[in-house]
Structure formats: structure tokens, C-alpha cells
Amino acid sequence: MKLILSTSNIMKGGRPSVIRQPQQKSNVELITSLRSNFLASQQIDHNGADSHANGTNGTNGANGTNSDANGSSSWTLERDGALYIPAIDFAQPGLAEDRDQYDITVKLFYLPGIPASRRCAHTREAIDLVLKELHVKSIDLLIVSFPGILFDADDDSEEEEPEPSGEPDHFDSMVQTWRVLESLHEQGMIAQLGVAEFGSERLARFLPHTKVKPSVDQINLKDCCVVPKSLILYAKQEQIQLLTHNDCNDILPVGTTRELLGPADKGGAGILASAPEAHDGIQGHVEPQWVVKYTAVVKDRGVVENKGYFALADVGTCVKPRP
Amino acid sequence: MGLLALGTALEWSEAKKKAGQVRQWGIEQLLANWRRAKGKERDALLWGDEVEYLVVALDDAAKKARLSLAQAEILKSLAQDEALWKAGSCSNGGNGDHDGEEPPHFHPEFGRFMLEATPGQPWGIGFKDLLKVESNMKWRREVAKAHMAPNESPITLTTFPRLGTKDDYIQPYYPPSGPALRSQFVPDEIANPHIRFPTLAANIRSRRGRKVELNVPVFKDRNTPSPFKDPTVNYDLHQWPEDADVRNGAAKDDHVYMDAMAFGMGSCCLQITFQAKNMTEGRKLYDQLSPLGPILLALTAATPIYKGFLVDTDVRWNQISGAVDDRTPEELGEAPLKNDRWRIPKSRYASNSTYISQDPRLRKEYLDPDLVIDENIKKRLIEGGMDDLLATHFAHLFIRDPLVIFSEDLEELDLNKGDHFENLQSTNWQHMRFKPPPSDKDDIGWRVEFRSMEIQMTDFENAAFCIFIVLVTRAILSFDLNFYIPIQRTTENMETAHARNAVLDQKFYFRKDPFVRRAPRHAAQHSSNNSAFSSTTSSAVNTPPPSPPLGPVETEYELMTIAEIINGCSDGFPGLIPLVESYLNSVNVDVETRCFLASYLDLIRKRADGTLWTGAKWIREFVAKHPSYQHDSVVSEEITYDLIKAVEEVTAQEGKNGSVGWEFLRGKKN
């Protein structure tokens, strides 16, 4: 089964989502805003619908007396084989003003260890959710983050983590993925494409394989102002805008997903069992597939009106445990 | 300063009779304009900064620094160039660095030794625009300097250290004691000669019934006499009736005494004006920025010297407040109310006194129950369709008398103009100003002005503070931040900000939690459907409070250090800089811009935590370490000359490589 995790609009979500302490990992924004959205939805549910005992969906936790298992039945929603955590009502209006007032940026994180062959479907799935959430037909910029690329500002040679076995050619798979993005660009769904963490060498190797060039290269600067000159020059020459970001390279680790969704007595949302074979929630291995972040900024006022995340994980007995 | 119309300015005895008419006409103009502009929507963020300069003239041979009164000549020369520029024949300043930028505008100010410069066109929120601010400020300085005598230059000190001393601190020299100011320290020629300015000064004095009175506590160094009796005061003058003020106790022991508008309105400030998307957003920004006023005042502190003495305060604010205080003894509460209508607790130049946003988070407890308003004016505004909060705001501003009235303007009421409204609006110098769109310009929206900051010595700092405030406004709107505290606490904070080294030593009232409580989407939806404005039974002024019910107002805020407010504390207030950074992490910022912004935010972070000094502290240390300083609080002509030279060097070198001023700009010598 697919689990679709969402944060709703984190700009209105209060402190936990917004402020990061210096020592914290940068994926804390995603994790804490998911957690607080789950909590808030459960509270509303508890306050609003006491007599919701006979949930109609499939999250029948083995021990039905568990109040959290009960609760999850109404604050989540199962539709077309996917469990929305929490339930999303796409009938709610998206943005306050006309579409042309906004710059909508979407960043899609392909996660480590997930076969590149799935990226085509994943990309469509992720973009589709964002379009539905914001009630728009297209986005202005899609930045894709490939797993395993780490930009190192000091020596301008982005490190590649050793390629996982069963992943024949990392570079080829990026080019393959780019074809999918180019087709979405052609369909008018995405105005501009971007990559993340590419150094100048990788860009130089990548560009000849593209029909639609990336307009953006997004890099994470630990200490701002130390950008390799070669990258600055190359980006300028190729008219690629260098943007900064503050995202984590491992945005949603497997263990974190189970922590988030596991039994309530362990601080989770009460959806998943505490272990693949345990009986206190949905059984099976859990495997996060992708994470997407979206922001809608009112262009000439610089106001971030909507920002949020979706994450998708597969769960069930057919999901293979990770090596 | 607003537009300078010419005409016949009425003396106070005449102006006083016309005050009611001007107020009434001003209110009708406001209503007409409000009806026209209240529906204006979707205006872009545009903003502008105003940098004010002192023009100093250095006499290297005599080692003297003086104020230059050449404002008129400099402005004339600047205006000619601007005209040439507009005509297309690019002259000076048209170098490649500022291609596509309109030439800056220069404006007169109250002091004849002052200049004000604004960018040629307003800034937007495009990050490329933010990068231009500092270089544009530097450009303004270059252009101004190019129109001055070789020994003159524009400097951005808030005040001239020896304004009002007995020596020849102005060039050309005029002896003190003229008919308009009647000051025993400064001549009338110190003020801009345009009829508006001497009239303003004279009518403030006449309305008040005596000269303005500024007593600033002296900084007691080890050789400072105690009690300190300001040695520059002359008790034996008999030219004007007001010369008796000092014999009646105007000059207080242990204080530096000043007696003219020039001592306040001759100060340089750093002000920023923002255009909001509509009136609602403008009102929200006005309220939310208001509690930040005193914080930014303390953080920008740069005013430790008056009239040749080190003083025990760090900022200019109260001196300006006193310098334009036109309240009568009855209004001040020194005499029983007989002729005047009410007692008024604050000067026309003061922290603002009421909130105006139709925000459900605005609780009644945040408002001042003793706010003085003109009930008739409020009634008229409400009859005219204005809501209670905004009507209250203007009915408060309009308790004042108009100070400068031109008889030509009283012949006919023109509802397409805003002159009478502006007459009152622009002489209410509060730390925030809410500006309706000009009645004759359709392309300008509702604006909010942030007015408390002190000018900084370098353009790097001035750009940093402007851009910081701009980013704070974006964070306020993006995160829907709530900084409300009872407005009287802001008034108290404003006083607190004056203390020597308040930035590190004092604590300020500030709201603990700026965030809305999380309302999940269907709940949020419900409440937004429900946002018809009703001010009925609840604590909130505008809509019923959200559930769960609100706690006591006193639990919402506490005393915090500036460092906690700016940089955050682990369990309490998250900090303005972390909020701004969180905002920046949510928008697409290019690498170069982010680096610039990082250097600006770093300056502010370090000012707040004490790693970097304020300008005030640096000036104090400069004086204390000067070989000729006697530790008697006296800032001599020689020290002043060396200080001005050092300020010029700081402005150029910005403390780089251990050059002078590194203590407040870099924090380290290399």
C-alpha cells in the first residue's frame, strides 16, 4: 500500500515547522511539520467526531481497542489504494490570488536505493499532488535532487557516494530521468527545470545530454560565500542560475518514517506497526519513495503564501526489506 | 519633509484661530481620499530608504570641524545636475556601476547643515534590488560630495557633537539669539530659511508659551563636577522674553540644557517606507512593526554627545521629542485645564499610541484605555463610513493643532487635495506612520513608515538595517507573525532604549510566542469563513477569540534582552534573525545575494550579542581614549575634529583590515 504523508501549509504551522536550532539536521523541517500536522489532525478528529467508531477504511490495526488505531480510521483517508495521512480534502481552495501572481517552485527528492526506473511514475505522481493541492495547472520551476550527490564547496568536486549495487550507471539514470522532465516541460506543466548539488564538471558532462537545459543549479552552502569560482563562471556562461538551499541530502531516512508513523506509545502517529511483523499497526516493511517540497511565493511582494511537503512511502509484505 | 509650498505663513496668534478649520478640512480630505483609495488592491511591495547627512567643513590648519550651512547652494547645484540628467545628457555619477538606476533625489531638511537623499526610484523585493541598496547609498554620498566645497563632506552622524557651543561651530558664522528660535545657543540661520521652518519653530515656541526645553543627563566621568551645572548656560540674557526661561529653572542640574528645535530636528535618522498590497496589509504591518521600534532604536544607538558633552543616553529620540514639544502648561498637566481641551501625555514626536489593524489577534488589552482622541472628529469619520479603529487613530492624531498654515490655502476646500490632512499628519512624528495614498497619484498605494532607527556611520550598516527590516516585514507576512504587546509597553520600551548601552544592559518587553496556534485546514477554513468584523463580547477587538480561550495578556510577553529578541533563545522567542533566515530558506535566493544578506544579518546578530559595538559605544570609547580628554565629560573642539576625521575614514574604509572603527563593523582587527 502507498502512504501519502503531507504537511499542509507549514507557513501557518507555528514554531516547530519554522525554526531550526543550529545543531539540528536540516530535514527537521519536514519531520516536525509532518508530526505536527498529524497531531493537529488527530486533535480535530477527537474533538469533532466522537462517534466515528466504524471507520470504513483498511487501517484495521490488530488490536481494535487501541484508541489510536480507532483514531487513525477517521483522520486518514484511503482512496485508490493509497492512504492519505492525514486525509486531504482537495476541494479546499489553493491560492488566494490569480495564478500569474505566483512563482511556484517544486523540489523533488528522489530517495536513495529506489530504482531509477520508478522515477517516471514518481515524478508524475508528485507533481500531480502538488497541482491538486495548489489548484494550479502548471509550476514555474521543478528542481530535482538525485540521491547520493554531495556538493562540496571546498574543492568543487562533488562526491558521489558509492553506487548501490543493482544501480548500473548513476549518470545514465539521471539522463533518463531528465527525459521525463523534458516531456513534462514540453506539455507545459513545468516552465523551468533545475538540478541540485551539481558541480561544474558534472554540469559540463550533463548538459550535452539535455534538450531542455537546467535553468537552475541549487547548492547548499554551509558557510555562504565559498562558491568555487569554476562553478560561478561556468554557470554564468551557460546561463544557469545558482540558487541556495538548506535541505538535507537524506531527507527522509527509512527509520524516521517508521518512527513517525509507528505506534502512539512510541511517539508515532499510530499507523504502522512497531516492526514489520508486529501486530500493533499496519504490517510489513516500509520504504520511502520520494519527497516533494512546494512553495508558492507572491512574486512582486516576496510573500511566501504556501509551502509544504508530500512524501510517499510503500508499506506491506510485498515490500522487500532494504539490504 | 513634505513638499515645500510657498505662501503667507500665519503667526501663531492667527494660526490658532484657523486651527479648527484646518482640522475640519483635513478630515474631509482624509475621508474623500479614504473612500477613493480604500479598495486599492494588489499593489507591489515597493520601499524606499531615506538617509540624512550632516554637512561638515573641515579646517585642517586650525584643526576644527564645523557644520556647513551651504545646504541651499548644494541642493541648487544637485538639482541642476538632476535636470541635466533627466534631459539625457548624463553628467557626473553616470558611471557603469549604476546603469539603469535613476539618479538619487536630494531634499532639504530642517537643519541648514543637513541633506536628505533617497533612491531615484523605489526598491522592489527582487533580490537583485536588495543588492543595489548599499551601492546606491554610496553613490548618493559621492554625488552629494561632488557638489560640495573641497573641504566639505556629508557624514552620517546623528548629531554634530558641538552644535550649540560657544565657539564658531558653523560656517559661515552667525551669532545666536534670533527672533524665530530665540535660542541662546543657536542662531535662526541654523534652520532652513524656507518660511515653513522658522514658522514651525516659532509657532511651536509660541504655542508652548516658552522655549522648548531639553535636559539630557550628563555622563558623569571621574572628573565631571557634581552636581554638574551646564557651564554654557547664560543666565543674564535679556533680549527676548524667553531669555527668562533659564532663570525660571529650565536648565536642570546634572543635565546638558538645550533650548531650540535645531537640537532635535537637526538629528539624522534612517527611515524606511513600505508600500503594502492594500489597506488591510498596511494596517497589519503598522501594528506588527510597532513593537520593533524601540528594539531597533537601541540596536542602532549612535548619539552619545550633545553640545560638547558626553551624555548618559545613547539615542536621539527624546531630544527630538522635546525639541518639537508644543504642549501648553495645561496640556502638560502643569496648570489646571482652563483654555485647552485636554491633558496630553506625549509630545507630537513620540512612540505611537494605538493599533489600527482589523486583526482578530488584536485584543482590547493591547490598546491604551486613556488614549486622548477628539470625539467629534471620530464621530465625523465614523459617519463618513470609517471603521472604529482607524477613526480612533486619526481622531488621536487630530488632537494637535496645525502649526504652519498658509493663508492662501484657506480660501476654498479642495477635496481632491490632501494638504490640510497632511498638515496634521506630517507634524505627528510618531515612530510608525500610516500613510494613505496621495490623493493625486493613482500609482501609489497604502504605505507604512518605520521611523525609529538612528543613522549609522557607514552605508554598509545603513543598508544592513534597511534590508533587515524589509526582510522582517516579509517574514511577518509569510509566517503571519504576531508581535502584539500592550501598546503602553512599547512606550516604556522607548524610554528604556535611551539608557547608556541599553543594547546590552537593558531588557525590553516583547511577545514570547509570535506564532499563530496551528489550526488544521478545515478548522482554519471555518474561522476564515467567519471573519466578519464584530467587536462584541470578547477580548479581541475584531473577531471572537479562537478556542481555546486566551490567557491573561500579561502571560503573553516578558522582559527580554535585545540579543534574545534578535537572535532568539532556546525555549522562548525564536529570534528575528532565525525567522528571517527561515523565510530566506523558503524562497529562491541566488548565491551572490545570499552572501550579501548573510553579511548584513551577521552585523545585526553581532550588534545584538555585543560582539560588535554600537556607534554610540565606539564614539564614547574614541573620546575616552583621546589624549586630550580630561575625563570631565567635555568633548572639545580638538576631539571633535579628530572624531569627524575618524568618521570620514570609517565611512570610506568600513573598518577593514583593522582600520579605525573595526570594533563596530568587523569585531576583529584583521
Image: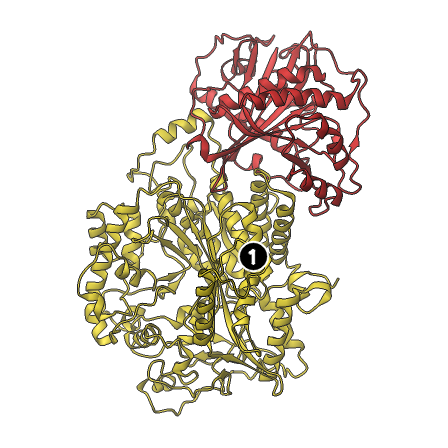
Chain colours: A red, B yellow
Looking at the picture, tell me which residue is in the foreground, B454 or B508: B454
Image quarter where the C terminus of chain B lies is bottom right
- Extreme-left residue of the structure: B411
- Identified by mark 1, the residue type is His
Can the viewer see residue B503 in this picture? no
Q: Could you tell me residue A11's position as x and y percent?
A: 51, 35
Can the viewer see residue B138 in this picture? yes
Q: Could you tell me residue A238's position as x and y percent?
A: 68, 37
Q: Quadrant of residue A62?
A: top right
Q: Quadrant of residue B527?
A: top left
Query: Is B571 positioned to the left or the right of B121 in the image?
Result: right
Query: Is A267 positioned to the left or the right of B227 in the image?
Result: right
Q: Could you tell me residue B652's position as x and y percent?
A: 64, 67
Depicted B283 relative to depicted A305: above or below = below
The crowding category of the residue bearing disc 1, from other C-alpha atoms within 10 Å (few below 14, some 14 to 19, many at least 20), is: some
Total marks in image = 1
Q: Quadrant of residue A295?
A: top right
Depicted A4 relative to depicted B447: above or below = above
- Return the residue at label 1: B98
Looking at the picture, tell me which residue is in the foreground, B133 or B423: B133
Residue in the picture at 74% in, 45% down: A229
Residue in the picture at 21% in, 58% down: B414
Query: Is A100 positioned to the left or the right of A195 in the image?
Result: left
Depicted A321 relative to depicted B503: above or below = above
Chain assignment, label 1: B
Image quarter where the N terminus of chain B lies is bottom left
Residue in the picture at 66% in, 66% down: B653
Q: Could you tell me residue B533's position as x and y percent?
A: 30, 37
Depicted B156 relative to depicted A27: above or below = below
Looking at the picture, tell me which residue is in the foreground, B38 or B234: B38
Which SS class for mark 1? helix
